[in-house]
């Protein structure tokens, strides 16, 4: 069974004194990142500039998230690599064939492209699978149902993300219509990757992971609601 139990780590008095502030500080930084982005996209008068900062926001969010990961091992590195490559290649297939998700193309907002897909998209898949997998692990469900729950959480986020993505040039759908195949494709791939998450043998106690998902969800829900007005 994958190891999920906590361990006792010897800490100096100074480390003990400041460790209680690490999580609140990280959450505060996450909120600030996304609050600035929210203001910039909607109210700054220069949304294109803030769109260009999206890759930086994604990189900083991942840096924070994985700074809270404990017990780095080969199993985790393999998991991370497989999820990033699988997510990226699924997008390559999707962009070039219309399979999996539907007919779409990426804009410039997500940074450098390879094969017409932003390089950072694989990292985004890893972040979402990792964060929602931790949320699913708070339940007492069977591991397979946890994988399904994780996939559903990702689709919920994607539902609010899609109209925002089209507005801010993350990607564009053919005829500006988001097909049902996008959500079914996301769910299928997400569940498969969550099955890997559940069975992979690495330590799965990251206290920041749920906050990453919640902050991102609130960010995109907020943008979605403002764009409906």
Image: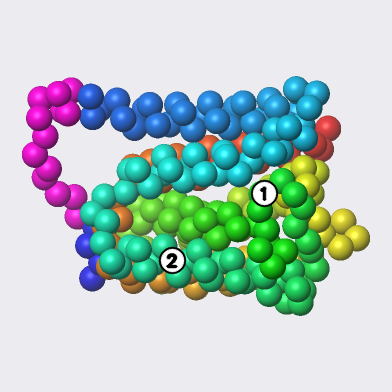
Query: Mark 1 or 2 closer to N-term?
Result: 2
- Rendered residue at 49%/33% (across/down): 30
- The answer to whether residue 134 of the structure is visible from this angle is yes
User: In what quadrant of the picture does the N terminus appear?
Assistant: bottom left
How far across and how far down the image is residue 26, in percent? 40, 31
Q: Which mark is residue 82?
A: none
How far across and how far down the image is residue 38, in percent? 66, 30
- Rendered residue at 69%/39% (across/down): 52
Residue under label 2: 81
* Colour scheme in use: rainbow
Task: Report the side of 73 relative to 215 (left or right).
Answer: left
Above or below 21: residue 134: below
Q: Residues within 10 Å of mark 1 (few under 14, many from 20)?
A: many
User: In what quadrant of the picture does the C terminus appear?
Assistant: top right
Above or below 27: residue 89: below
Of the pair 36 and 5, the residue shown nearer to us: 36
- The answer to whether residue 143 of the structure is visible from this angle is no
The number of discs equals 2
| Magenta stretch prevailing secondary structure | loop
Q: Range of the magenta residues? A: 5-17
How far across and how far down the image is residue 11, in percent? 11, 34
Q: Residues within 10 Å of mark 2 (few under 14, many from 20)?
A: some
Task: Report the side of 68 relative to 57 (left or right).
Answer: left
Above or below 61: residue 99: below
How far across and how far down the image is residue 95, in percent? 74, 69
Residue under label 1: 110
- Rendered residue at 33%/59% (across/down): 140
- Look at the numbered disc 1 and give the secondary structure of its residue: loop
């Amino acid at each position: 069974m994958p190891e999920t139990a906590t361990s006792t780590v010897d800490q100096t008095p100074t480390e003990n004194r400041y460790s209680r502030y690490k999580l609140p500080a990280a959450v505060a930084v996450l909120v600030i990142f996304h609050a600035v982005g929210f203001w910039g996209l909607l109210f700054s008068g220069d949304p294109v500039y803030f769109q260009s900062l999206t890759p930086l926001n994604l990189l900083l969010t991942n840096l924070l998230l994985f700074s809270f990961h404990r017990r780095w091992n080969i199993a985790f590195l393999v998991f991370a690599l497989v999820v990033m490559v699988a997510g990226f290649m699924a997008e390559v297939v999707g962009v070039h064939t219309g399979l999996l998700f539907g007919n779409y193309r990426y804009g410039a907002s997500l940074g450098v492209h390879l094969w017409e897909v932003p390089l950072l998209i694989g990292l985004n898949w890893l972040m979402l699978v990792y964060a929602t997998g931790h949320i699913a692990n708070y339940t007492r469900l069977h591991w397979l149902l946890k994988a399904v729950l994780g996939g559903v959480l990702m689709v919920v986020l994607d539902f609010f993300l899609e109209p925002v993505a089209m507005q801010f040039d993350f990607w564009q759908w053919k005829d500006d219509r988001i097909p049902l195949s996008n959500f079914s494709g996301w769910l299928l791939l997400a569940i498969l990757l969550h099955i890997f998450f559940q069975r992979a043998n690495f330590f799965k106690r990251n206290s920041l992971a749920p906050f990453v998902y919640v902050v991102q969800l609130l960010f995109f829900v907020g943008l979605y609601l403002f764009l409906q007005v």
